[in-house]
Structures are given as C-alpha cells and as structure tokens.
C-alpha cells in the first residue's frame, strides 16, 4: 500500500469517522453490533471498513488505543498534582469511567491495553501511580498494602464500574462518587 495514502488527511478523517462510529455502535449494541453496522454508522462501505481494519479485533485494538489517548488527555487535564489525594483519586475515577463509558466494549471483550506498553505507562500508569505513591507517602493510603496491590485493586474496581455505567445501572457522577468512597474507605491509612 502507498505510504502517502496511509497518512493522508482523507485517510485520517476516514479512520476517525470509523473509530467514532465504532465507539458509538459498539457501546450501544455491544457484541451484537456487526462490522456492517459500524460501516453504516461511519458512512462508509464494508469494503472500505475492511481496508482500514481487517478484523473486528483490529478495530477493537484501535479503539483501545484511542481510549488510552483520551484517558491520558483527561488525566493530564485533571490537575492531579495540585489537589489532595482524595480529590485526585476522584478525578482519576471520573476521567477513566467517562472514557470507559464510551469505550465499554473494549472492557467487555477484554481488549485492555498492555500495561507493559510504554505509551500506556506514560499516559495512564505514571500519573495514577504518582497519586497513589503520594497517598502512601502522606499516609492517606495504607502503607501496609503495596502500591502495586493498591493499583491492582483500584483497576479492578474501575473495570467493574465501567461495566455498570455501560449497562446504565449507575450514572457517571454517582459511579465516580461511589468508587472513590468505596476505594478510600478500604484503602485509607488507619
């Protein structure tokens, strides 16, 4: 394939349209949504969709990359360093759950970003880890539980919350408040 076509403005717009449509269709219809549904929502033919994304899995992987980028941008804008740990955790929850709602399909289908990926670590891992390390250092969070365990527990709680929000069993703001409260009650230093 011609590399100029890969990076052309038209291709970028088409890719963006496909990914935006996929996020909406897959969030609404989940596993029942077909590639044809995504193509129709994007305003492209199925052949065009398959030129950009050869498989459903490749489409989901691209959505996961978009989710990481969007969550990273939200975390960068959240001002995590300038607020108390408890508020920083609430802002993290709100940012991740808001993004997760749009990209819930990647959570439901287990297409989660690789934690070993440098970009994932830079955009998500480092800012979250910094808040948690500050929480342990300032004795807001339990020092008797390792940072990695606290992060793993927090991640599991976020994953469950994204599923609940995606199922419309709880709203975004209520979810952010509940997760923050539940997590802090269990992880707060005594």
Image: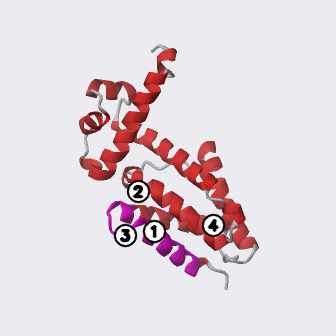
Quarter of the rendering containing residue 33: top left
Residue 50 percent across, percent down from the top left = 33, 27
Identify the mark at residue 173; answer none if there is no mark. Answer: 1
Name the residue located 66 percent from the left edge and 66 percent from the top edge. Answer: 132
Q: Earlier in the sequence, mark 2 or mark 4?
A: 4
Q: Name the quarter where the C terminus is drawn.
A: bottom right
* Label 2, label 4: how far apart the Cα atoms are: 20 Å
* Label 3, label 1: how far apart the Cα atoms are: 8 Å
| Numbered disc 1: secondary structure | helix
Are discs 2 and 3 less than 8 Å apart at CB? Answer: no
The magenta segment is 163-186
Q: Is residue 47 visible?
A: yes
Residue 130 percent across, percent down from the top left = 70, 61
Q: Closer to the camera: disc 4 or disc 1? A: 1
With respect to residue 47, does 189 lie above or below? below
Q: Earlier in the sequence, mark 4 or mark 1?
A: 4
Name the residue located 40 percent from the left edge and 38 percent from the top edge. Answer: 19
Q: Earlier in the sequence, mark 2 or mark 3?
A: 2
Name the residue located 51 percent from the left edge and 22 percent from the top edge. Answer: 7
Name the residue carrying label 4. 88
Q: Closer to the camera: disc 3 or disc 1? A: 1
Q: Name the quarter where the N terminus is drawn.
A: top left
Q: Closer to the camera: disc 2 or disc 1? A: 1
Name the residue carrying label 3. 170
Identify the mark at residue 165; answer none if there is no mark. Answer: none
Are discs 2 and 1 less than 8 Å apart at CB? Answer: no
Are discs 3 and 1 less than 8 Å apart at CB? Answer: no
Residue 173 percent across, percent down from the top left = 45, 68
């Amino acid at each position: 394939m011609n590399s100029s076509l890969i990076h052309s403005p038209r291709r970028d717009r088409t890719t963006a349209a496909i990914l935006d449509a996929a996020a909406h269709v897959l969030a609404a219809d989940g596993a029942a949504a077909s590639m044809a549904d995504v193509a129709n929502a994007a305003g492209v033919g199925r052949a065009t969709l398959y030129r950009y994304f050869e498989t459903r899995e490749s489409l989901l992987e691209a959505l996961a990359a978009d989710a990481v980028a969007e969550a990273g941008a939200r975390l960068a804008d959240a001002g995590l360093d300038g607020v108390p740990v408890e508020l920083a955790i609430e802002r993290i929850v709100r940012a991740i759950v808001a993004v997760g709602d749009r990209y819930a399909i990647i959570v439901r289908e287990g297409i989660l970003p690789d934690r070993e990926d440098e970009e994932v670590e830079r955009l998500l891992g480092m800012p979250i880890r910094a808040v948690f390390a500050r929480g342990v250092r300032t004795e807001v969070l339990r020092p008797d539980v390792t940072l990695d365990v606290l992060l793993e527990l927090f991640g599991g709680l976020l994953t469950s919350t994204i599923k609940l929000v995606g199922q419309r069993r709880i709203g975004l703001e209520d979810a952010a408040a509940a997760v923050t409260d539940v997590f802090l009650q269990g992880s707060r230093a005594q």
